[in-house]
Structures are given as C-alpha cells and as structure tokens.
Image (cartoon, rainbow, N blue to C red):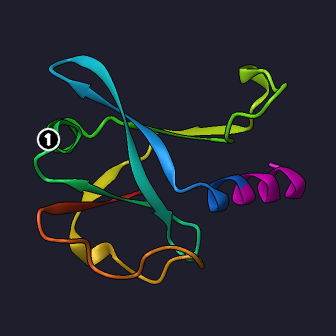
Amino acid sequence: MSPEHAAQLADLVGRRRAAALGTLHAGAPCVSMVPYAVLADGSAFVIHVSRLAAHTKDMLADPRVSLLVMQPEGEGVAAQALARVAVQPKPRCGNSLITPFRPGTATAKPPPGCATFGMS
C-alpha cells in the first residue's frame, strides 16, 4: 500500500465511529451496525456490543466476521464512489482489551452487560 493510500485509510477509519459488522447467524449472513474504536497503535479495531445481542452470540459461536467502514453519503456522490474498507478480522472477547485509543474515542471500561471484542 502506498503512503498516500495508507494515510487515506487511516483518515477514513479515524473519522468514523460506526461500522457494519457481518456475522453468520444460524449459517446465514447477518449485518448490524456497531460502534468501534481503533487501538492507538492502529493494530486492531475494538467494538462494544451487548452480551444479549444476536451478533455477539454469533461471534462467540463462529468467529468468521467482516467489518465495513464507509465514508458518509453525500449529495451528488454515487454509492460506488464512496471511500470504504472491509476487513475480515479475528475477534477476541475480553474487557481487558481496553487500552488508550486515538483522540476522540472512549477509554473507560464498557458498561455492565456489554462485551468487548478486539479485532485484528
């Protein structure tokens, strides 16, 4: 990846706060929106989800997931022209994953009833 593309990718991921999370639910694809942050060193995404949510149970049952971050829609911009990145990370569950994030992201432990997944 060129330095220019790496900078564009870091900017896109750093400006957004929600991503589409794709999981397998009873063997069928399922997509939901989740809040995310990126570790300060850029090595992993961190998402907070409810322990009661279907996508949390899906990730625990089958770790094959996809995460999509996309530029917001705008007037006169075709959907196909929006900047986006999709990754197929390896989720790891555990509240100990909370470390300092990039500016503008939460650093506190998630509220009770939430699960924290690191995705690298």
Q: In which quarter of the image is the C terminus?
A: bottom left
The percent position of residue 115, horizontal first and vertical second, equals 20, 60
For the record, the magenta segment spans: 1-11
In the picture, measured across the screen, residue 55 lies left or right of residue 67, that is left
Q: For residue 90: magenta? A: no
Q: In this view, does 41 lie above or below 59?
A: below
- In the image, farthest residue toward the top: 28
Quarter assignment of residue 11: bottom right
Q: Which of 22 and 103 is in front in this view?
A: 103
Q: For residue 2: magenta? A: yes
Q: How would you rate the neighbour count of disc 1 (Cα within 10 Å): few for under 14, some for 14-19, many for 20 or more? A: some
The percent position of residue 104, horizontal first and vertical second, equals 57, 75
Q: Is residue 3 above or below residue 20?
A: below
The residue sitting at 14% across, 41% down in the picture is 57
The percent position of residue 23, horizontal first and vertical second, equals 30, 31
Q: Name the residue under label 1.
A: 57
The percent position of residue 42, horizontal first and vertical second, equals 58, 68
Which kind of residue does numbered mark 1 sit on? Lys
In the picture, measured across the screen, residue 111 lies left or right of residue 84, that is left
In the picture, measured across the screen, residue 90 lies left or right of residue 52, that is right
Q: Nearer the viewer, residue 116 or 63?
A: 116
Query: What SS does tag 1 mark?
Result: helix
The residue sitting at 20% across, 71% down in the picture is 111
